[in-house]
Each structure stands twice: as structure tokens, then as C-alpha cells.
Image: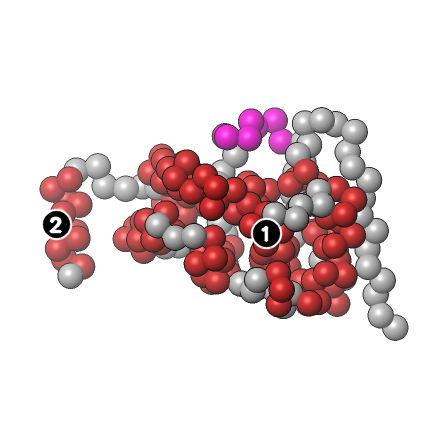
Amino acid sequence: MTDSAPTAPAPSSSPSVRTSDRFVAYVHQVCASTQARAALRRGLGLPVERCTYMHRYLVPWLRDHDDQHYGDVRRAYYAVAALIAARPRSARDTTPDQATPMSWYERPNLGASLGQAVAKGVLKENSAESALHLMARQSSDAIHPGLPALVRQLLSGGISIDWAVLLEDLAWWNRSRDRIATRWLESYFRTASTTTNPALADSAEENDR
């Protein structure tokens, strides 16, 4: 017996709930099925054209809620669905909160998550900054393949990710890369426990060479 595709929940009547938040809630619902979670996970890092098993679960939702034909937007939806499905077991108990009182730009983006990882010792400062600066120079096509490993490292270290924010940032990346990358970097430096003394920072960099 096979699982039937979950029915997409009705759109919230509250105008404050973004489409991206509704999508994340839907994917969490879908992932309650082991079969569906495995199908979504097979799309990790892949372009939409190679995500054959994901269409069954995502095409109906996109048709009814946000039927985007723009390639970058569609790939962002598929990428985030795969990342959620591939969460390590320790991170599967977390559920999205659509009623957060926080404004959109106060919510943690990927830069903030990397900053938290540095502050908690999950990632080394140089590694996190190098990853951010590299992504800031890349197109979304170059970013997507590397996201699964980075996200898994964050989640395994107990660092949470705001999937809806990541979804919208990926969807707009090629059109607003500089703006989004700047926001990620600013959030990172506000969050990470970084060295404020330039001389000490230079010394640490020399020791790493």
C-alpha cells in the first residue's frame, strides 16, 4: 500500500502569514510520511528537472498557492523542501511557527544561522566567513549544490534555520544577490562572537597559515 499525496492545507485567512511560511508548514506535514520524506530528500542539491519524485507533492501545492514559473523561484521551493526532508533525526521535532510576532527582516537568515554556529563553536569563524564570501560571489546555480552539507552541519549542531526566509532569499538571489548577501553578512557579524581587535584577528589568521 502506498501513501497518497497529502492534501495541501487551505490558505490561512490571516494576511500576515506569508506564502513561504505556508509552504514550509505544508512540507513539514508531508514529511510526516516516511515515503514522502524519502521522495523529497532525493532532490537534494539537484535542479528541478532531475527532481522527478518531488513533483507529486509540490506541483499541486504550487498550482493552488503560488504557481511560479520563474526558474529560480521554482528551484528555491524544491530546494527548501528537500532540505527540510533531509533534516537529521535530532532536528525533526521542530515545527514552524507561523504566528511569530517578529517582523520579516528581524527573522534569522542564513548569515545569522552561521553566526550562531560560530558563537556556539559548531563552525570555525574562518570557515563560516569563507562560505559567506564565496556565496556572495556565486549565482544560485552554484550555491544550491553546496547547501545540503552546510545546512546539515548547522542542524546537527543544534542551529535552527528559518526555512521561509531561506526560501525567499534563494528565490530572489539572482535578481538581488548583492542586497541579500549584504543582509547575510550583516546578520552574521551581528550574531557571531568575532574578534574585534584587528591586530588579534591578523595574528590568528597568520597562525592558521
Identify the image quadrant of residue 41: bottom right
| Number of dots carrying numbers | 2
Name the quadrant containing residue 10. top right
Magenta segment range? 100-106
Residue at 45% over, 39% down: 176
Residue matched to label 1 = 71
Q: Which of these two is toward me, 20 or 171?
A: 171
Q: Which residue carries the number 2 mark?
A: 203
Residue type for callout 1: Gly
Residue at 74% from the left image edge and 63% from the top image edge: 36
Helix, strand or loop at label 1? It is: helix
Question: Callout 2: 10 Å neighbours few (<14), some, many (20+)?
Answer: few
The answer to whether residue 172 is above or below residue 100 is: below
Earlier along the polypeptide chain: callout 1 or callout 2?
1
Give how far apart the Cα atoms at labels 1 and 2 are. 45 Å
The answer to which quarter of the image holds residue 177 is top left
> Which quadrant, please, contains the C terminus?
bottom left
Q: Nearer the viewer, mark 1 or mark 2?
A: 1
Q: Is residue 167 left or right of residue 136?
A: right
Q: Is 95 one of the magenta-colored residues?
A: no
Question: What is the x, y in percent for residue 33?
Answer: 76, 62
Mark number for residue 165? none
Image location of residue 21, percent across then percent down: 66, 40
